[in-house]
Image: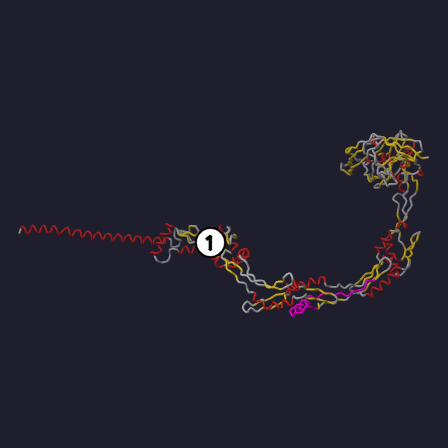
Amino acid sequence: MAVRAHQQTDQYRTAAPVRSATQSLISAALSMTATVAFIIALLASAVVAYGFMYRDQVYPGVQAVGVDIGGVSTAEAEAALDQRTAEYMSTNLTFESDGQTFSATPGELGVTFDTAQTVESAYEFGRSGNWWTDSREWFDALFFGRDVGVTPVVDSDQLQSYFQSIAADVGARPEEPIFQLTSDGQLQVTSAANGVGIDVQQTARDLEAELSNLEQGPVAISTVEVQPAYTEAALEPMGQRLSGIMSEDFILERGDYQWALDAQRLDALMHIEIDSETGESELSIDTERLEQQISRLAEDAQADGQDARVSWNGETYEVRPATDGWQIDVGEAVTVVEEAILAGEHRAALPVDEFPAAITTEVAEEAAEFGNEIAETRMQLTWKEGETDIGGSVIAAALGFEHDSEAGVIEPEVSVEDLTTFLSSISNDVNVKPVDANLRYVNGEVEVQSEEKTGWEMDREASAESIAEAVEAGESSAEIVVNEAEPEVTAAMAGEIEIREMISYGETYYGGSAPNRAHNVERATELANGALVPPGGTYSFVESIGGEISEDTGYVEGFGIEGATDGGVTTVPSIGGGVCQVSTTVFQAAFWAGMPVVERNWHVYWMPLYGQDPTGMTGLDATIATTAGLDFKFENTTGDWIAIVSSADGNANRFEIWGTDPGWEIETEGPNITNRQPASSETVIEETDMMPAGTRTQVETAHDGFDVEILRRVYDSEGEQIDDLALNSKYQPASNRVLVGTGN
């Protein structure tokens, strides 16, 4: 029993551990399963939570053209993409074709970007509805990123337009065969050739691939072969007909006028339509081009109608006959020529519009007869204390004819303007100049030395109208209209003139002059003394001494400067020699008075004695020559009368200007001497038959030549500048010149 019991005990103890291990394994398995189930449940919950968290957003890690749009709202994503694509719009995309590169901005290609669609596509990423697939895509995007690109929108018309703009550089148009004239006028057919064009669809697809990633290319331009619309075979039936048309010139004619359309011009007019399906051809004329050719022809191929006209040939009136005009009717001509060419004809009459002359030859002949009758008569002209007559040719030359095309008539009309011009040629025979009263200021009083005389002057315009009226009335005489011409200075003015004070003076020295020269100085001084100048008037030295320097006016022979046979000048015996010293003295007085200088001429040589004090200055001289028309003149701008008071006492020649002192201030600069030319020291001896034989006189002393400028400014009592004078003189060198007499 005990043994059995022991055995039972051992058996019991042995069986117990086996049951415990199995139970542990089962428990462990159950525990692991529960853990896995928990983890799976946890992951599922996490996946569900992740999906729920980003239910309104793009999943993290998702990008569009490098812009991270994950984890943000669709509005934020669109804004970020709008900024990125806006930057891209300013870049240049490049295309390549056979070594050539072309570029354009996306905007020029008609490209925009649909960022809303892009964000929508990005939002759909990871939302297939399959949790296993979606979660895997979430994982990949989160850890590795996912770029969905951007959605481009291309305006196909604008893109097509761009490709058309570069098509000529990328490919070549197919060449259809054409008829062509050879240099010898033969018609031949050119060969057809395939062309190369852009494969727009393929190139657009390649472009969109670049655009979706905002790349800049280059995009390879795909090309395709382009077949010509038709081949040489389609032209063969038309060749014989065209050859016949262009075998000779097409003549357009109108009377004696002919114009030719040669083969080249005809060729330019031909237009052939070919049906690409049937191969049939049809010949037509390019009427627009034909109209252009006929329009150009019409500019020259016309005759302007000319009205008959009457004109004066210097002796008689002659008639230019009328001619009718015509011009091409361009529209009708196009129809006529088109039909003739297509009919195989080589000649057609041009339709024209004709228009007759408005003024006929008969009307002009009647007008010419009227004018010639006037030309054969003479007309007497009368006026106060005179008369003359003029030939009818003068009136006829002034007779015009108004050609009225609307009325078809010619009306005679005397030209007052032409008659006025003619009358100017005889006005000096009619006019009598008024004579001013000769007033002189003598010993402080204004004296009337001679009374004024009224003159008259032809009123040329009124006289011309008088003659025109007489001609139109058929009269043979007319009156010349004259108007009285009043003198400027009258004797009555003598009592109104008040000479108050001396304004300025000029003084030069002639002591030591030869007797004849001294006589001439004193004679000119005597004649000039007392001259009066009204306010605003002009003083003339030549007029003040009587206008003539001769023996008849009291002058004797002295020495003066004249032109030499070699083109230079020389000093010779001359009536009135020495008078230029008097004009120089007057000039100096006017210069220091501030009077505006109207005319002044300098001596050929400088005379040093004219530059001495008290009023002289180098370059301050004035020469006169009545035979050459040289004078010294100045204007009286003092506002009152002035008087010239002169004297010569055997030593000094003095001229004073008296009147009302205007209070002017005189400012001078200079003399500025330049361009000095040394005088020759040699003595020049000349013979003259104007001096008695055996006489010998030195008439010139050597002096340098030079240019000199003197400036004078005149200011009124208010300090305002009223005159600006620049005296520029050019003096030649003077030589030691001796005259030897050879005369009787």
Q: Position of residue 154 (x, y in %)?
A: 49, 57
Q: Which residues are magenta?
A: 319-348
Q: Residue 335: within the magenta?
A: yes
Residue 501 in sight in this render: no
Taking 160 as reference, is 551 above or below it? Answer: above
Residue 432 in sight in this render: yes
Q: Position of residue 151 (x, y in %)?
A: 45, 55
- The quarter of the rendered structure image containing the C terminus is top right
Q: Residue 696: within the magenta?
A: no
Q: Position of residue 156 (x, y in %)?
A: 51, 59
Q: Position of residue 564 (x, y in %)?
A: 86, 38
Q: Residue at the spot x=48%, y=59% of the render?
A: 201
Q: Secondary structure at mark 1?
A: helix
Q: Residue at the spot x=84%, y=55% of the render?
A: 418
- Residue at the bottom extreme, as displayed: 343
Residue located beneath label 1 in the image: 210
Its colouring scheme is secondary structure
* In-image side of 15 versus 742 (left or right): left
Taking 465 as reference, is 348 above or below it? Answer: below
Q: Residue at the spot x=56%, y=67% of the render?
A: 233
The picture quadrant where one finds residue 238 is: bottom right
Q: Which residue is nearer to you in this view: 202 or 481?
A: 202
